[in-house]
Amino acid sequence: MNLQWYPFVFLPVHKPTGPTSHDLVDRIRRVVGKGVKVGHTGTLDPFASGVLLMAIGKATKFADFVHELPKAYRAVIRLGVETNTLDPTGEVTAEGEVPDLDQARLDRVAEALTGRISQVPPAFSAKRVNGRKSYELARKNQAVALAPKHITIHHLKLTPLDELRLECEVACSTGTYVRALARDIGEALGTPAHLESLERTSVGPIGLAECAVPEDLTPENLAQWSRPVSEVLPRFPEVELPYRAYTYLVDGRAFPCETPQPAEFLAVFKRDDVMGAVFRCAYNAELGQVQPKGLCYLAPDLR
């Protein structure tokens, strides 16, 4: 991406423990400036840290596609104690003996929980129960019965840290609750368990190395840390089209194009290597047309 920043990008930040995801949104809004929309693409609880992708400008329209990306986490699981939230912020609800943690047994548990599995979400979650969020009912000590959901665990590695704690490295599909995975690992080992710490290490192709420290962000270094939508979401590659196509797309008209294009893509128009306009487009091969699906960015002097 050209070093000139423009508000149709993702901004990966390294969320620290403590603040909420919305706290980070507020901080980034102050850096980006007034009039530019900012949103996050996947909540991390206050006790958790790691990769948090911020969507800037009309990149917020692509947040649902980010939700579909696989994610990876590094966690510490505390065995012998379960809490009502399945994390360190909750109240202790069960205690039990912890078995010997030999690696062969841990490998068998990891193998059994790898692949497409069924997972019951935590009661303290945003899942809806009769129109209300589950955590609202759980906070009132009301019984919550959530239906199991199918998820995919792509990779799971368990390593003992000491007699009571496991390190858990997991790569998983969207919809996975690592808190629930900690509970299920404990059940497989025959002991209560909860998540002691959690760090998200990647979202799709974006890892911790690509993340900015929120406190270090300034308007001057936004471009350095921003990532094009096409980099975060390879399903939307960037295609540079001739200026004549711009005159069609900006009016909401289909552009005749016999040259095959990706089924869905971002049509970009640059002047002197500076971004001028970006459109979300689809290519209709039968009609030989590039069809506009939305304007994502338009430079101020083109409006």
Image (tube, grey):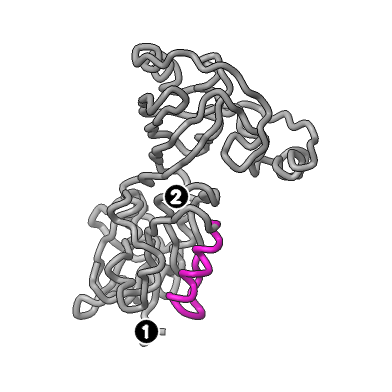
User: Residue reaching furthest front?
Assistant: 163
* Quarter the C terminus occupies: bottom left
* Quarter the N terminus occupies: bottom left
Helix, strand or loop: magenta stretch? helix
For residue 194, say whether it is visible.
yes
For the residue pair 39 and 79, the one nearer the viewer reads as 79
Alpha-carbon neighbours of circle 1 within 10 Å: few (<14), some, or many (≥20)?
A: few
Q: Which mark is residue 302?
A: 1
Q: Where is 229 relative to 94, above or below?
A: below
Residue 58 as seen in the image, left or right of residue 218 = right
Residue type at mark 2 is Ser
Distance from disc 2 to disc 1, alpha carbons, whole Å, reads 40 Å
Q: Position of residue 292 (x, y in %)?
A: 41, 63
Residue to which mark 2 is pinned: 49
Residue type at mark 1 is Leu
The residue that appears at 63% across and 23% down in the rendered structure is: 95
Q: Are marks 2 and 1 in contact (CB under 8 Å)?
A: no
Q: Where is 127 relative to 230, above or below?
A: above
**Label 1: which secondary element:** helix
In which quadrant of the rendered view does residue 160 lie? Answer: top left
**Label 2: which secondary element:** strand
Q: Position of residue 38 (x, y in %)?
A: 49, 67
Q: Position of residue 3 (x, y in %)?
A: 24, 73
The residue that appears at 47% across and 25% down in the rendered structure is: 164
Nearest to N terminus: mark 2 or mark 1:
2
First to last magenta residue range: 20-38
Residue 149 on the magenta span: no
The residue that appears at 56% across and 18% down in the rendered structure is: 191
Q: Where is 146 relative to 55, above or below?
A: above
For the residue pair 120 and 181, the one nearer the viewer reads as 181
In which quadrant of the rendered view does residue 238 lie? Answer: bottom left
